[in-house]
């Protein structure tokens, strides 16, 4: 039996980050109170680019069919300098291919997933303030009727944007800077020769112009504003002049959905956790749209926090597990901010010698497909490697996050490989990562199918003590077949045990990778991670004063 705090989790903000947190917590049996002070969903397109790792997470939440109906897959990113193509990055590998999927569509998918899981958004509800009081957070909320009420929650998740009320309430600094230049953005009808499934980057001494097609058939136009341009001067004619000045010529704009001017910030919160309160998405970090990482990083933030928070809420893990949220997602946020900052500055180079160096570097990198080695996989979210403390990661992976030969492609702190396998449970071929559970940890034994005593003992122990939170799977590497562990079918064999073991988290990250002879490391990790669950399982329940009463078992 486990005990846990029955209070719900308060999620502030119903954008992509907040909705992801609400969906993932609700799917895992945690009651959620998701509030947003807006009267309803925003129809502003805002973010557009969604990368494969985010699509994978959305698909896990049940959005596969909607994704297929709503997206515009991107075929390439093409860079120009003074109208000449200098780099053409084609997405031949689906694992790095982004799609155009406007933010309102992403949010609509997530709201549907939340409703399917039994949750809802409370619109027109504002967080006035909160205070942390031991095991509870007391929050003052103002409803659509203007009435204020105080409610208690177990945790608060601040996903309320760059002007976060949660961050302000915690008095957490938002360090960084604002770019000197402003940028103009428009969603608009565009007549001309540009392919809608290619993102075009037109670099010139006069400024940057970026265009890409939308699933609706319209185009997004994004360009740097000339110095001194006032917001009230930006209309269709002004955007047309900028496109004529910086684009390839022959483009005619008409019938805009919206035109806006905004500043680009590069900021991150001093910390993203304060006791029982967390910050994620734009509340934790904002940066240039270069690279299209904003929405994607926020969704990944929320997913990382939600599965950990759920384990703690249910009493399966100690709250120290939550410390890794700030460490892991901080690593990603810092890299994303740096990458976006560098790319934005590269866009805006205007001195002849700087432009020459940039153009030549892009030509060489494009011709040798150097972007496909690391940059595009990183943008796609496939190269996330959470640095872990201590010597074990240095021993089991290469410095660049590459797997050692013989490791089967597994890297501690990195995503499970997407290799195709035959999943016997589903009777179909699919990526390994998709075949593993996203609601429980997985003890994955992989090798040629001959499992020795060490692997068998570990699997049996997991089945006896951790089955509620860990499932055991067998990956036969030669046959490329995945099947569930069955003790009666997998007795220990004689001879050397060549099995390797990967303990995989619900987010598809390999928490620990080792050989069968080091199986004690996995058991020690599980005993530490699920100590509350294992302790409660060993503790006999107190005798009931009423023999006929029934007690709930969690």
Image (cartoon, rainbow, N blue to C red):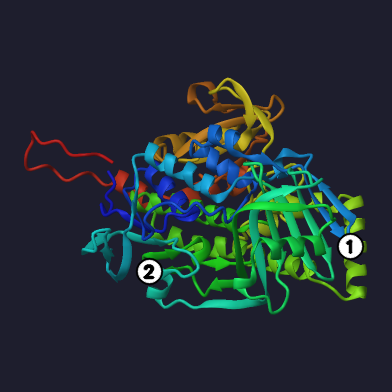
Q: Is residue 13 left or right of residue 473?
A: left
Q: Is residue 439 above or below residue 313?
A: above
**Where does the image place residue 76, in percent across and percent down from the top left?**
78, 46
* Quadrant that contains the N terminus: top left
Q: Is residue 280 above or below residue 91?
A: below
Q: Can residue 290 be seen from the camera position used here?
A: no
**Where does the image place residue 407, in percent across and percent down from the top left?**
71, 43
Which structural element holds mark 2?
Answer: loop
> Which tag, 1 or 2, sits closer to the chain's start?
1
**Where does the image place residue 396, in percent across and percent down from the top left?**
68, 52
Q: Residue at x 60, y 32 (%)?
A: 452
Q: From mark 1 to mark 2, how far is it between C-alphas?
A: 52 Å
Q: Is residue 33 left or right of residue 330?
A: left
Q: Is residue 225 above or below residue 29?
A: below
| Residue 153, picture quadrant | bottom left
Circle nearer the viewer, 1 or 2: 1
Q: Can residue 530 be seen from the camera position used here?
A: yes
Q: Residue at x 23, y 59 (%)?
A: 145
Q: Residue at x 93, y 74 (%)?
A: 353
**Where does the image place residue 508, in percent across and percent down from the top left?**
57, 44
* Quadrant that contains the C terminus: top left
The residue beneath circle 2 is 275
Q: Is residue 63 left or right of residue 432?
A: left
Q: Nearer the viewer, residue 227 or 367?
A: 227
Q: Categorize mark 1 by other alpha carbons within 10 Å: few (<14), some (14-19), many (20+).
A: some
Q: Is residue 2 left or right of residue 476?
A: left
The residue beneath circle 1 is 82
Q: Residue at x 33, y 48 (%)?
A: 314
Q: Nearer the viewer, residue 3 or 209?
A: 209
């Amino acid at each position: 039996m486990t005990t846990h705090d029955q209070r719900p989790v308060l999620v502030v903000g119903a954008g992509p980050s907040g909705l992801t947190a609400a969906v993932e917590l609700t799917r895992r049996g945690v009651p959620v109170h998701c509030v947003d002070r807006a009267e309803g969903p925003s129809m502003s397109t805002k973010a557009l680019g969604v990368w494969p790792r985010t699509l994978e997470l959305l698909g896990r939440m049940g959005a596969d069919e909607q994704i297929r109906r709503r997206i515009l897959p991107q075929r390439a990113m093409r860079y120009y300098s003074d109208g000449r193509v200098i780099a053409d990055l084609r997405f031949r590998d689906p694992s790095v291919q982004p799609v155009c999927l406007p933010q309102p569509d992403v949010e609509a998918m997530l709201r549907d997933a939340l409703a399917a899981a039994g949750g809802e958004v409370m619109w027109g509800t504002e967080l006035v303030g909160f205070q942390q009081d031991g095991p509870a957070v007391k929050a003052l909320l103002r409803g659509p009727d203007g009435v204020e009420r105080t409610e208690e929650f177990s945790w608060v998740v601040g996903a309320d944007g760059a002007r976060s009320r949660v961050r302000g309430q915690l008095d957490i600094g938002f360090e960084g800077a604002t770019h000197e230049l402003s940028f103009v953005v428009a969603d608009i009808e565009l007549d001309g020769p540009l392919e809608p499934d290619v993102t075009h980057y037109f670099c010139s001494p006069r400024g940057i112009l970026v265009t890409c097609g939308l699933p609706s058939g319209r185009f997004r136009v994004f360009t740097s504003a000339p110095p001194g341009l006032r917001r009230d001067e930006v209309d269709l004619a002004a955007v047309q002049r900028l496109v004529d000045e910086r684009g390839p010529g022959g483009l005619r704009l008409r019938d805009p959905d919206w035109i806006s001017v905004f500043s680009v910030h590069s900021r991150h919160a001093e910390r993203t956790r304060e006791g029982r309160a967390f910050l994620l998405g734009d509340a934790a970090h904002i940066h240039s749209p270069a690279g299209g990482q904003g929405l994607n990083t926020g969704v990944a933030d929320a997913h990382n926090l939600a599965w950990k928070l759920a384990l703690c809420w249910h009493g399966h893990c100690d709250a120290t597990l939550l410390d890794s949220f700030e460490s892991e997602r901080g690593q990603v946020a810092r890299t994303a901010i740096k990458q976006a900052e560098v790319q934005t500055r590269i866009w805006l180079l205007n001195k002849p010698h700087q432009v020459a160096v940039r153009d030549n570097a892009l030509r060489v990198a494009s011709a040798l497909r150097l972007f496909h080695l690391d940059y595009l996989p990183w943008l796609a979210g496939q190269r996330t490697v959470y640095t872990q403390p201590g010597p074990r990661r240095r021993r089991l992976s290469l410095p660049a996050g590459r797997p050692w030969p013989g490791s089967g492609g597994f890297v501690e702190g990195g995503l499970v490989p997407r290799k195709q396998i035959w999943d016997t449970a589903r009777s179909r071929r699919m990526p390994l990562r998709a075949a593993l559970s996203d609601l429980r940890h997985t003890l994955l034994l992989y090798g040629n199918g001959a499992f020795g005593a060490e692997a068998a003992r570990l699997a049996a122990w997991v089945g006896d003590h951790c089955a509620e939170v860990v499932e055991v799977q067998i990956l036969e590497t030669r046959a490329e077949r995945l099947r569930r562990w069955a003790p009666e079918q997998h007795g220990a064999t004689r001879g050397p045990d060549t099995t390797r073991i990967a303990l995989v988290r619900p987010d598809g990250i390999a928490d620990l990778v080792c050989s069968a002879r080091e199986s004690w490391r996995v058991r020690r990790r599980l005993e530490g991670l699920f100590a509350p669950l294992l302790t409660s399982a060993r503790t006999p329940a107190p005798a009931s004063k009423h023999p006929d009463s029934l007690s709930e078992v969690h």
